Amino acid sequence: MEITKYPTHLAIIMDGNGRWAKKQGLLRAFGHEKGVQSVRQVVEYCVQHNIPYLTLYAFSTENWNRPALEVKALMDLLIKFLKKEADALHKNGVKLNVIGNLDKFPPKAKETLLATIDKLKHNTTTTLTLALSYGSREELATAIKHITTDIQAGNLTPEAITEATIQKYLYTHNLPDVDLLIRTSGEYRISNFLLWQIAYAELYFTDVLWPEFTKEHLQAAILNYQNRERRFGKTSEQLK
Ligand code: IPE
Ligand code: IPE
Ligand code: MG
């Protein structure tokens, strides 16, 4: 086993902002704001260690059910983040990508997002994918809808459908499978994130709340990952 191997695709469920804020006697929105610092740290880490794909779960399809005020705070924060960080991301050669259903997004947030994606489109270090209004089940339903449309149009036959075909219809069509999935805040669940894409991912859970998550915490997760044996169904001996 190659001990120094970094994940090609790192995905993170950034959880615990609300609990962090509560612990400080602050409103939940402050937790989200503080969480931006952690985003900065993990992006920098990926750039420094040549991790080509970083995907962050920032807002789920289910998060639309939160109080309107919190949803608005998150949308405003996204706009602020994109405007404030665009230059730093650009300097670091970071490309921006988004997965999720943006049709539900407030126009201003969508515009800012698309403009930032455009600004960073030629960058080649790390691809930062933000999962926004993202739900894995919604992604799969959308994929099936498009597959059916293509079959009806005569562009695809049912017999020709393979795993690779399905992959092609997902929001993540241009991303490789996830190698390492981290969830913060001591919750042991996936919450509708990348169900197809994590089929063979290594999972890492930490009690650290997202606003307190630093490069050192990420380093610890990577080290743990590097000491695992990924067998993909084979025996340990076969890998030698
Ligand atoms: C994660 O933190 C951020 C989002 C889901 C947008 P939470 O807001 O879920 O924080 P907790 O889980 O309530 O502490
Ligand atoms: C998952 O966190 C979504 C994001 C991190 C954006 P939640 O805090 O919404 O997940 P549940 O509802 O506790 O499972
Ligand atoms: Mg949460």
Image (cartoon, rainbow, N blue to C red):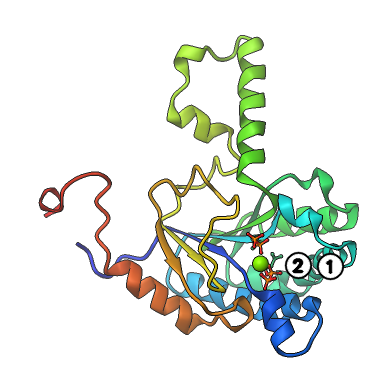
Left or right relative to 211: residue 73: right
Mark number, residue 177: none
**Which image quadrant is residue 151 in?**
top right
Marks 2 and 1 sit apart, C-alpha to C-alpha, by 18 Å
Which one is closest to the eye, mark 2 or mark 1? 1
Left or right relative to 83: residue 49: left
Give the vertical position of 84 relative to 193 (above or below): below
Please give the residue where the numbered disc 1 appears in the rendered image.
Answer: 70
Query: Closest to the observer: 166 or 44?
Result: 166
Which amino acid type is marked by label 2?
Leu
Task: Locate residue 61, reporting x and y percent.
Answer: 72, 50
**CB of residue at label 1: within 8 Å of ligand 1?**
yes
Which residue is rendered at x = 19% and y = 62% of the image? 1
Which residue is rendered at x = 28% and y = 47% of the image? 232
Task: Locate residue 80, reporting x and y percent.
Answer: 81, 71
Please give the residue where the numbered disc 2 appears in the rendered image.
Answer: 82
**Residue 36 can be seen in this image:** no
Q: Earlier in the sequence, mark 2 or mark 1?
A: 1
Left or right relative to 155: residue 233: left
